[in-house]
Image (tube, helix red, strand yellow):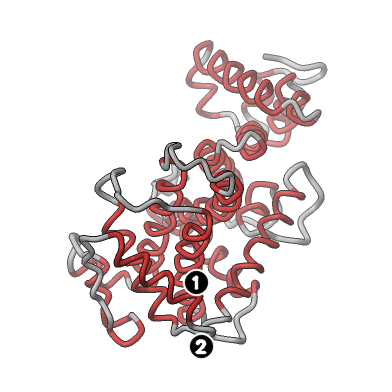
């Protein structure tokens, strides 16, 4: 477990040494050289061995660098769920190490904040890619008639800062010893970012038009987007969920455009018909995006089976409805 000039025991009590220790391991070198899958597997094996050899020291040592390396390897390997898990874990380690944390002072926090001015690191091209994808979706959002034309990506960044800060505040106040308590806020930040990356990748796959192939990757991506939308509604309006822990999207009707909360859907053709209106109307009303997102969430959350064949064009329309709903809620929640 040791590296030249750095012992494992010394690193346990020194976060800076721990970062250096992990960055010198073979798995980090493999990831840095572009051998992402091999590096990821090597890193998992290394951490498992470390935990088995001394679980108490494993819990104590700062693992921010190790988790960040694995998170980035997962992104390049297109394993977006593992990426969310490890980048989030790296940020938790950084908060445990330093609170209040200097935002963007660590690679993991800088990633979660999509900070363009963070020191260059292996994740910098990924952050740049995420920013481009978000900017593209902001342009789509602004095609809606009643969108907030002043919306800029910095408003999206402000939400990410709130989510990370909320995680930090709850963790440190509820746990004086800084043992983190899961709040969901930071998970929402990392999930949002990997969602944009995954959506872009899924759009490439579905463009091959394999009519008899599985729809599972696209189904889950759409569902993830719908769940993120609902999560953002809960974040901006916690009083609704506090009043009714079993609340549904319809419970937020007072905060939806026109108070429209008719999200029940028994026929996927209804969703397809609404999605078609996104092209038929040059400047559709944003309430149309909300209706599509709500109905889609209630339809696809219960089954993989549909009679409707979802092609690349329909997938893009549905994805645009979801991201436009998310961005509109962020725009209206921005102060």
Residue 175 lies, in percent from the top left, at 40, 48
Residue 300 coordinates in the image, percent (x, y): 31, 52
Give the structural element (helix, strand or loop) at label 2.
loop
Give whichever of 267, 302 is nearer the camera.
267
Which residue is depicted at the point 43% across and 71% down? 276
Q: Give the position of the N terminus as an image quadrant.
A: top right
Which residue is label 2 attached to?
145
Report the Cα–Cα distance between label 2 and label 1. Answer: 12 Å
Please tell me whether residue 28 is drawn above or below residue 151 in the rendered image.
above
Check disc 1 and report its element: helix, strand or loop.
Answer: helix
User: Where in the figure is residue 270, as x and y percent of width and height?
Assistant: 29, 67
N-terminal label among 2 and 1: 2
Is the residue 90 above or below the residue 267 in the image?
Answer: above
- Whether tag 2 and tag 1 are in contact, CB under 8 A, the answer is no
Q: Where does label 1 land, which residue?
A: 324
In the drawing, does residue 154 fall left or right of residue 159? right
Q: Between residues 292 and 151, which one lies in front from this camera angle?
A: 292
Q: Is residue 307 left or right of residue 88?
A: left
Q: How many marks?
A: 2
Q: Residue placed at 32% from the left, 87% from the top? A: 258
Between 228 and 86, the one lying in front of the other is: 228
* Residue 44 placement: quadrant: top right
Residue drawn at (23%, 71%), measured in percent from left and top?
250
Residue under the image location 58 percent in, 57 percent down? 100
Farthest front residue in view: 211
Task: Please give the label number shown on residue 84.
Answer: none
Q: How crowded is mark 2: few (under 14 residues within 10 Å), some or many (20 or more)?
A: some
């Amino acid at each position: 477990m040791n590296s030249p000039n750095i012992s494992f025991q010394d690193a346990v009590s020194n976060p800076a040494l721990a970062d250096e220790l992990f960055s010198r391991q073979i798995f980090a070198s493999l990831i840095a050289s572009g051998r992402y899958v091999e590096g990821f597997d090597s890193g998992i094996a290394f951490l498992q061995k470390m935990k088995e050899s001394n679980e108490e020291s494993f819990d104590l040592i700062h693992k921010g660098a190790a988790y960040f390396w694995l998170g980035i390897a997962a992104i390049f390997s297109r394993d977006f769920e593992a990426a969310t898990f490890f980048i989030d874990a790296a940020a938790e380690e950084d908060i445990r190490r330093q609170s209040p944390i200097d935002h963007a002072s660590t690679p993991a926090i800088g990633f979660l904040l999509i900070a363009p001015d963070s020191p260059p690191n292996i994740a910098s091209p990924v952050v740049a890619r995420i920013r481009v994808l978000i900017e593209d979706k902001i342009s789509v959002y602004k095609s809606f008639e009643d969108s907030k034309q002043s919306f800029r990506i910095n408003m999206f960044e402000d939400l990410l800062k709130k989510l990370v800060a909320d995680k930090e505040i709850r963790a440190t106040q509820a746990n004086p010893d800084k043992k983190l308590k899961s709040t969901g806020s930071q998970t929402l930040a990392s999930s949002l970012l990997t969602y944009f990356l995954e959506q872009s990748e899924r759009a490439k796959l579905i463009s091959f038009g394999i009519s008899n192939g599985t729809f599972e990757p696209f189904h889950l991506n759409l569902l993830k987007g719908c769940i993120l939308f609902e999560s953002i509604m809960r974040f901006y309006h916690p009083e609704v969920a506090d009043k009714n822990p079993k609340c549904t999207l319809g419970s937020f009707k007072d905060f939806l455009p026109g108070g429209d909360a008719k999200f029940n859907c028994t026929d996927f053709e209804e969703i397809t018909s609404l999605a078609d209106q996104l092209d038929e109307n040059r400047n559709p009303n944003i309430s149309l995006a909300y209706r599509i997102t709500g109905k889609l969430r209630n339809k696809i959350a219960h089954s993989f089976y549909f009679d409707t064949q979802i092609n690349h064009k329909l997938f893009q329309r549905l994805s645009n409805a979801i991201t436009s709903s998310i961005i509109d809620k962020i725009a209206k929640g921005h102060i």
